[in-house]
Image: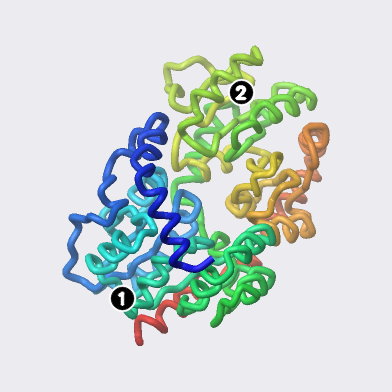
């Protein structure tokens, strides 16, 4: 595929983009806010030179947190601009950084919208997080001599095959990037096989994300409120279809007095998951209803984490964590946050989004892989009946996390090269 054909196909889709926003707004009304930015119209203006980072949604924004904090510290005479694709990513940016950074939506990858974005903000350097390859955006940066870096880059075997099928447009796009900072050797090799150059191995920024100062204290407070002596199992960042499997596994495990916290990955699914728990006839409470006057959580067997930005708090409150998106072929969510707090981690068979981290964590004894709900039930039962095993996995998780830090400093050094230039 040539970039001309790629662009032509995007123009064919352009009339449907308002319908897509309206459809998504049914579950998340915030999709209708700042909609003009998606077509390249912006009101923000800055007097300082702009360092621009694109963080698609929540995961990328949280991963970039330590890097952004270092950029704010090292480059006080620059304006940090974060662009996002989702309202939850934008909300996470506001929660983490407030007015210290500016934020906007990245426009659709159409030449006219990209041109408006680049001419309006005139970034001195651009940074794309993970696997965000937009080929007109890359071409636009090259046209305006804006260094564009792909950092914390990961590329699964499946994604590499997909980009390979795009042919010329993907090859030219990767060649036009100024530099690539890959997470692992495998990621680097796949990117190089698709014609990326100036590829170096930086490690994973997510290992450098530390809990907020009050997260552990809030986790302990939540634990006290839920029942300090109760065994607590956390199903974190669950995806559509997984909650029923988790409820089935917890039922099979049959742990006396067990409290299961379920935190759906997407906030628009909170009510759907609440209805599912009710359908199974289980008693439950929810984070949004937890007040000093609410019923005692000891009366409930499930607790719905219907809040945003509290994942570290949930991890701090639990004994064992299952990482969602991995029981079904969805690639798995971030297991690094749970490991950094020393929690024994359970993962399903599908972890291609964090393939090497998952493999190394299992090899280090910090995580355990299960293939189905029966194995998940058996692992839950084993960990809650064997405290020594739980403690060994906890210690392994802390050691594993400590050994893999340092990607932020390496990435900052890479960005600094282009800011000096």
Q: Position of residue 367 (x, y in %)?
A: 74, 50
| Nearer to us in this view, 68 or 131 | 131
Quadrant assignment, res 16: top left
Q: Position of residue 318 (x, y in %)?
A: 62, 37
Quarter of the image containing the N terminus? bottom right
Element marked by disc 1: strand
Q: Is residue 397 above or below residue 163?
A: above
Q: Residue at x 65, y 56 (%)?
A: 354
Quadrant assignment, res 293: top left
Distance Cα–Cα, label 2 vs label 1: 49 Å
Which tag, 2 or 1, sits closer to the chain's start?
1
Left or right, 388 with respect to 144, comes to right
Element marked by disc 2: strand
Asked whether residue 399 appears in the rendered view, the answer is no
Can you tell which of label 2 and label 1 is closer to the viewer?
1
Q: Residue furthest bottom?
A: 421
Q: Is residue 245 above or below residue 21?
A: above
What colouring style does the render use? rainbow
Asked whether residue 361 appears in the rendered view, the answer is yes
Mark carried by residue 344: none
Q: Residue at x 26, y 54 (%)?
A: 99
Q: Position of residue 398 (x, y in %)?
A: 66, 57
Residue position for label 1: 124
| Nearer to us in this view, 316 or 283 | 283
Mark carried by residue 302: 2
């Amino acid at each position: 595929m040539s970039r001309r054909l790629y662009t032509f196909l995007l123009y064919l889709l352009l009339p449907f983009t308002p319908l897509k926003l309206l459809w998504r707004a049914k579950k998340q009304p915030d999709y209708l806010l700042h909609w003009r930015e998606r077509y390249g119209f912006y009101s923000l203006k800055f007097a300082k030179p702009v360092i621009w980072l694109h963080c698609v949604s929540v995961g990328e924004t949280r991963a970039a947190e330590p890097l952004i904090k270092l950029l704010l510290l090292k480059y006080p005479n620059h304006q940090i601009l974060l662009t996002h694709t989702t309202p939850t990513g934008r909300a996470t940016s506001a929660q983490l950084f407030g007015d210290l950074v500016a934020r906007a939506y990245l426009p659709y990858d159409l030449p006219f919208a990209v041109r408006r974005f680049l001419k309006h903000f005139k970034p001195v350097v651009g940074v794309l997080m993970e696997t965000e390859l937009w080929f007109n955006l890359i071409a636009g940066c090259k046209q305006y001599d804006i260094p564009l870096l792909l950092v914390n880059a990961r590329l699964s075997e499946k994604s590499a095959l997909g980009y390979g099928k795009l042919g010329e447009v993907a090859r030219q796009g990767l060649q036009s990037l100024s530099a690539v900072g890959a997470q692992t050797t495998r990621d680097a090799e796949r990117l190089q096989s698709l014609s990326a150059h100036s590829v170096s191995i930086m490690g994973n920024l997510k290992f450098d994300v530390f809990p907020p100062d009050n997260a552990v204290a809030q986790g302990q407070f939540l634990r006290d409120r839920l029942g300090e002596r109760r065994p607590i199992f956390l199903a974190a960042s669950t995806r559509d279809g997984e909650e029923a499997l988790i409820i089935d596994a917890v039922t099979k495990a049959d742990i006396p007095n067990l409290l299961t916290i379920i935190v759906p990955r997407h906030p628009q699914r909170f009510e759907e998951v609440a209805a599912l728990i009710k359908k199974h006839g289980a008693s439950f409470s929810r984070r949004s209803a937890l007040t000093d006057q609410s019923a005692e959580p000891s009366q409930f067997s499930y607790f719905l984490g219907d809040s945003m930005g509290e994942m570290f708090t949930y991890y701090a409150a639990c004994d064992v964590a299952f990482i969602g998106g991995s029981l079904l072929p969805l690639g798995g969510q971030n297991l690094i946050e749970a490991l950094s707090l020393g929690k024994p981690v359970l993962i399903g068979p599908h972890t291609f989004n964090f393939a090497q981290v998952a493999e190394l964590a299992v090899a280090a004894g910090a995580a355990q892989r299960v293939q189905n709900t029966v194995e998940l039930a058996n692992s839950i039962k084993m960990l809650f009946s064997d405290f020594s095993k739980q403690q060994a996995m906890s210690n392994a998780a802390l050691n594993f996390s400590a050994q893999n830090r340092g990607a932020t400093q390496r990435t900052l050094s890479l960005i600094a090269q282009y800011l000096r230039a």
